[in-house]
Image (cartoon, rainbow, N blue to C red):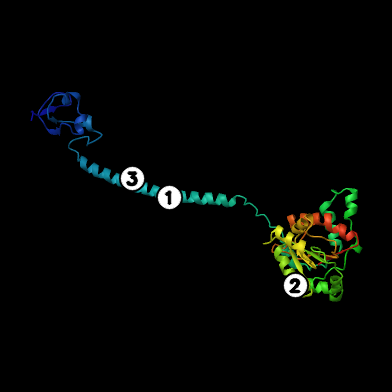
Amino acid sequence: MKTSLLLQDDGHLDQPEVCLLKGAYYFSHLPVEARATGYDVVMISTVSLYTSNIMADDLDDEWWTEKSDGNKHDEAEEEDSEEDTVINNSGSKRKLDSVQAIKDDKPQKKKRSKGKKISDILAKTEQEPIKYTDLIMAINKHYGGQLSAVERDDMSLSECHFASCSSVSDTVSSYLHTVLTVSKWKKRIKAMEQSPGSPRLLIICSAGSRAVNLIRDLRSFCSEECRVAKLFAKHIKLEEQTKFLKKTVIQAGVGTPNRIASLLDNESLSLCQTNFVLLDWSWRDAKLRRLVDIPQIRDDLYKLLQNYLVPRVKSGAAKFYLF
């Protein structure tokens, strides 16, 4: 190891008093002359000018006590920082509370009031008896001013075109017993020509499932010799019905407007012997819609009325029955 070097305040070398190893942190704070000597160990007498920010101002001072005080100071700062953290945390909580308060103060969107359901209305109101004017008003509402004067005259109906309407408590069987009577019905059946595909009674309803129920109820009115044709599309192809009607004599037919119109269009079904046109007017489906409330069924019904049923009734050969 090289000989030690002493550096005085004036830059002159003298006897060593304090030893600093070369390469230590405090070595970099020494004057250039001391660092440039090439000695491994530097001895200095006073370092206050170069290390005042690091050690005591005087080497006689107990600088390590200050360091401990500094540790206390650091601990105090840590405590302050912890307190600040708590304050900040609480502050953020207060901030969240204030944000929530602002959200609560915002005007809330008004919920749209739901319209009254038809089921609720029907539950509170008594069902009115069916009147023949119900069909006339429905036809006028549907066509409005779309018809020409001639077409409007062809579609006009009056009370003479209707039989007495059913009451609220009637079934199709009880209603037919009232307006036709079994004896009158049997006479009409016997007087029928053996012409296939032309029913004496035609019942029009809104769905195939409803038609099945009507056919079941109709059995108690019709005799065993009475054959009832299924005139709806559910599980029955048009071609099958066409073949059946062209070779079979039927006394009654129950079906939906669209399928009945299709069978009349291909002439497998005929109204030449039809005297009773019964409309399933007051029955409602699962959505509480009547025959004239379902858009597609309603359009098909009015086309059927205009093209086939109203001309037949206005000729005097048949009447409308509203059930």
Position of the C terminus by quadrant? bottom right
Labels 2 & 3 near each other (Cβ < 8 A): no
Task: Estimate the x, y position of residue 137 in percent, counting from the top left.
Answer: 85, 58
The residue at which mark 3 appears reads as 77
The residue at which mark 1 appears reads as 89
Q: Residue at x 90, y 59 (%)?
A: 314
Report the front residue among 256 and 93.
256
Report the front residue among 32 and 158.
158
The residue at which mark 2 appears reads as 217
Task: Estimate the x, y position of residue 53 in percent, counting from the top left.
Answer: 26, 34
Q: Is residue 145 positioned above or below 263 on the image?
A: above
Quarter location, residue 231: bottom right
In what element is the residue under mark 1?
helix
Report the front residue among 50 and 102.
102
Q: Residue at x 86, y 76 (%)?
A: 183
In the image, which is nearer the foreground, mark 3 or mark 1? Answer: 1
In terms of sequence position, does the residue under pointer 1 or pointer 2 come before the other? Answer: 1
Q: Amino acid at mark 1?
A: Asn
The crowding category of the residue bearing disc 2, from other C-alpha atoms within 10 Å (few below 14, some 14 to 19, many at least 20), is some
